[in-house]
Amino acid sequence: MGVKAQSVADIEKSEVSGTIQLKTLRRVAEALDCVVVYALIPKSTLEDVVQRRAREIARKALIRIDHTMDLEAQGLSQEEREEQIETYIYDHLRERDLWEDT
């Protein structure tokens, strides 16, 4: 790389601490005849992400109904609420862009 040993040590320390800059990492990679590959890897499956988003939308849409039913002493059990959410997802969200602002 054409730098002093202390500079290399500083770069190594910044890499270990997670503070290295991408441009520095690219420079090091180039000197080593390598390429930097930067990737974001999901912690869960795409199916899980979509399901969580659909449930979030359904809960928000149904919260008003749940509140009214609770006030009228007609509240649903947890099992009934889950069924209501699943039904809402099936009836209203199957063909919808889940990340579109509404």
Image (cartoon, grey):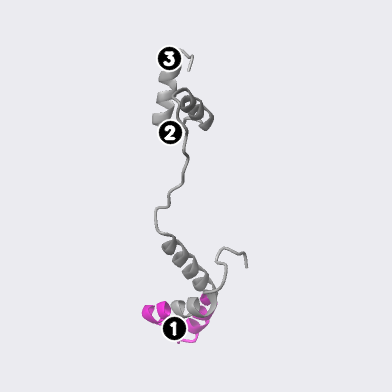
SS under mark 1: loop
Residue under label 1, please give it: 75
Query: Would you call the spot at circle 2 few (<14 residues within 10 Å), some (14-19), or many (20 or more)?
Result: few
Vertical order, 99 against 26 (above or below): below
Q: Is mark 2 on a helix, strand or loop?
A: loop
- Place of residue 61 in the rendered image (x, y in percent of width and height, measured from the top left): 54, 74
Label 3's element? helix
Identify the mark nearer the N-term, 1 or 2. 2
Of the residues tagged 1 and 3, which is closer to the observer?
3
Q: Which amino acid does label 3 sit on?
A: Gln
Q: Name the residue under label 2.
A: 18
Give whichever of 84, 4 is nearer the camera: 4
Q: Tell me, yes or no, whether the highlighted magenta stretch contains residue 56.
A: no
Q: Residue furthest right?
A: 102
User: Does 37 sit above or below residue 47?
Assistant: above
**Residue type, numbered disc 2:** Gly
Furthest-top residue in view?
A: 4
Give residue 76's quadrant in the image. bottom left
Nearest the camera: 77 or 25?
A: 25
In-front residue for pair 77/18 = 18
Quadrant assignment for the C terminus: bottom right
User: Could you tell me how far apart the alpha carbons at marks 1 and 3 are, in whole angstroms?
Assistant: 68 Å
Q: What residue type is labelled 1?
A: Gly
- The residue tagged 3 is 6
Residue drawn where x is 43% and y is 27% of the image: 14
Magenta stretch: give its range: 62-83
Residue at the extreme front: 33
Mark 1 to mark 2 CA distance (whole Å): 50 Å
Circles 2 and 3: CB atoms closer than 8 Å: no
- The span from disc 2 to disc 3 (Cα, nearest Å) is 18 Å
Q: How crowded is mark 3: few (under 14 residues within 10 Å), some or many (20 or more)?
A: few
